[in-house]
């Protein structure tokens, strides 16, 4: 059977049945995703080796986004999030994009940057030029720190140097560009920066201070594009309104902050589900949103000549498949297996596609019916559970509080009490 992400009616099954259907849809063997069961996932002993002073484990729901076709390949996407409606919204947007072939992506590569800060230089501009003259020497010294990376086709690729006026004087900043291949790259570039620092100081005739990567990963950009048919979105007026909402976010920082938060709902959920660094990705994306000196939307929606809607997104995504929690965390490994990806670029493409899908879904809801209707309908199940409803009672309580238009815990408790009285 050819793997497919089109699993219609997945929500109508219980979690165990869903997991079996997802395993089958992804072309995995039975039980391949068993570690997604809390009883078989990350153990306390494993957690104790990951961070300090471990006292427990916080569980986060992992949902599966369906319908995604990315660069011609169907992918079932794990999303770790506590927020209702995120997984359903992404899946629905992917279904709409599927009608025009799904999502298309491109990337600038896998280059990360390490910074070496030089302070107290007597001749900052002279130091800058001396460091550039030593480019080949410094690159060779960096590569010597990670022969394995070099053997895989990666390694130090370039050096740039700039002078930076600051309130404590002019500093000289060395940027070491490193192709990190399928790693996130923090450890590799930090090690290289530390090794370069003494020689940089000697060449500059000054003192080095910070030696660390930057999370502004603007040499590691992923771009994604998709066309959403007007008839599936709700017609020409919905397309026009989404375009107007997009223009609002492009021009206004207040709107852009929430607009981009919607994008990150999708991006962060996949980054977390695959054991990557959510804070690094979020910092990179938000810095990219402000790259022109003003905070703007990361995405753009425009009408095509045919009247459909094309969505585009460009984000820096420093994610990897080797090292860190991606290997140490059993659930993260299962997430990577589920995606059936072979490279960090494929993972980044998937993450970007989910971000765009999530953004489209939010903009469509805002333009068509308001964000609360769908969100609160799904949130009602969480409210019902918070009020004490059992698994068998949640659906009924949720349906009643939605019908009443009072999706609050105190009302759910009243409905639950009434339901129990009626059944006793």
Image (cartoon, rainbow, N blue to C red):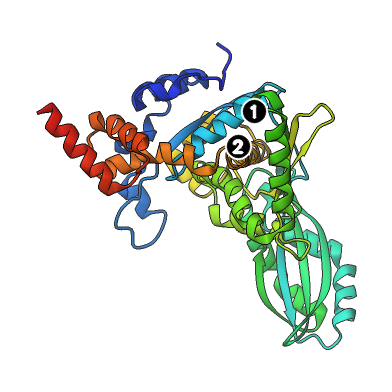
Q: Quadrant of residue 210?
A: bottom right
Q: Position of residue 183 (x, y in %)?
A: 62, 47
Q: Residues within 10 Å of mark 2 (few under 14, many from 20)?
A: some
Q: Position of residue 134 (x, y in %)?
A: 86, 68
Q: Which quadrant is the C terminus positioned in?
A: top left
Q: Judging from the image, what secondary structure is the residue with disc 2 in?
A: helix
Left or right: 379 with respect to 184?
A: left
Between the C-alphas of marks 2 and 1, the distance is 8 Å
Q: Quadrant of residue 292?
A: bottom right
* 321 vs 393: above or below: below
Of the pair 119 and 419, the residue shown nearer to us: 419
Q: Judging from the image, what secondary structure is the residue with disc 1 in?
A: loop
Which badge, 2 or 1, is on the more N-terminal residue?
1
Residue 234 is tagged as: 1
Residue shown at 28%/34% (left/top)?
397
Q: Position of residue 348 (x, y in %)?
A: 65, 41
Q: Residue furthest left?
A: 424
Q: Which quadrant is the N terminus positioned in?
A: top right
Name the residue tied to disc 2.
368
Residue 69 seen from this side: no
Q: Quadrant of residue 393?
A: top left
């Amino acid at each position: 059977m050819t793997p497919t992400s089109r699993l219609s009616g997945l929500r109508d099954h219980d979690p165990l049945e869903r997991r079996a259907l997802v395993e089958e849809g992804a072309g995995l063997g039975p039980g391949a995703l068993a570690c997604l069961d809390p009883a078989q996932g990350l153990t306390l002993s494993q957690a104790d080796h990951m961070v300090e002073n471990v006292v427990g484990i916080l569980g986060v729901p992992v949902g599966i986004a369906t319908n995604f076709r990315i660069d011609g390949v169907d992918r079932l996407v794990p999303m770790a999030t506590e927020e209702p409606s995120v997984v359903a919204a992404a899946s629905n947007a992917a279904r709409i994009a599927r009608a025009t072939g799904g999502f298309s992506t491109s990337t600038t590569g896998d280059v990360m940057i390490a910074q070496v800060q030089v302070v107290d230089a007597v001749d900052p501009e002279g130091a800058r030029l001396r460091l550039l003259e030593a480019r080949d020497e410094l690159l060779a010294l960096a590569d010597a720190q990670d022969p394995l990376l070099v053997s895989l086709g990666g390694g130090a690729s370039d050096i740039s140097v700039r002078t930076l006026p600051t309130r404590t004087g002019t500093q000289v900043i060395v940027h070491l560009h490193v192709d990190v291949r399928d790693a996130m790259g923090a450890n590799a570039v930090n090690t290289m920066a530390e090794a370069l620092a003494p020689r940089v100081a000697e060449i500059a005739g000054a003192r080095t201070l910070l030696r660390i990567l930057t999370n502004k990963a603007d040499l590691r950009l992923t771009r994604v594009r998709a066309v959403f048919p007007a008839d599936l979105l709700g017609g020409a007026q919905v397309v026009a309104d989404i375009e107007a909402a997009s223009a609002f976010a492009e021009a206004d920082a207040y709107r852009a902050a929430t607009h981009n938060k919607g994008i990150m709902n999708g991006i962060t959920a996949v980054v977390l589900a695959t054991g990557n660094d959510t804070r690094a990705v979020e910092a990179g994306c938000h810095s990219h949103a402000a790259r022109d000196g003003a905070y703007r939307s990361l995405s753009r929606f425009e009408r095509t000549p045919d009247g459909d809607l094309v969505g585009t997104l460009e984000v820096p995504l420093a994610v990897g498949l080797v090292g860190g929690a991606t290997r140490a965390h059993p659930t993260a490994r299962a997430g990577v297996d589920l995606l059936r990806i072979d490279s960090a670029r494929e993972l980044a493409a998937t993450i970007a596609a989910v971000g765009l899908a999530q953004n489209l879904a939010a903009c469509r809801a805002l333009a068509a019916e308001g964000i609360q209707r769908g969100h609160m309908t799904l949130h009602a199940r969480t409210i019902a559970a918070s009020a004490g409803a059992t698994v068998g009672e949640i659906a009924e309580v949720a349906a009643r509080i939605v019908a009443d238009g009072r999706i609050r815990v105190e009302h759910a408790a009243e409905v639950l009490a009434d339901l129990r009285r009626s059944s006793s």
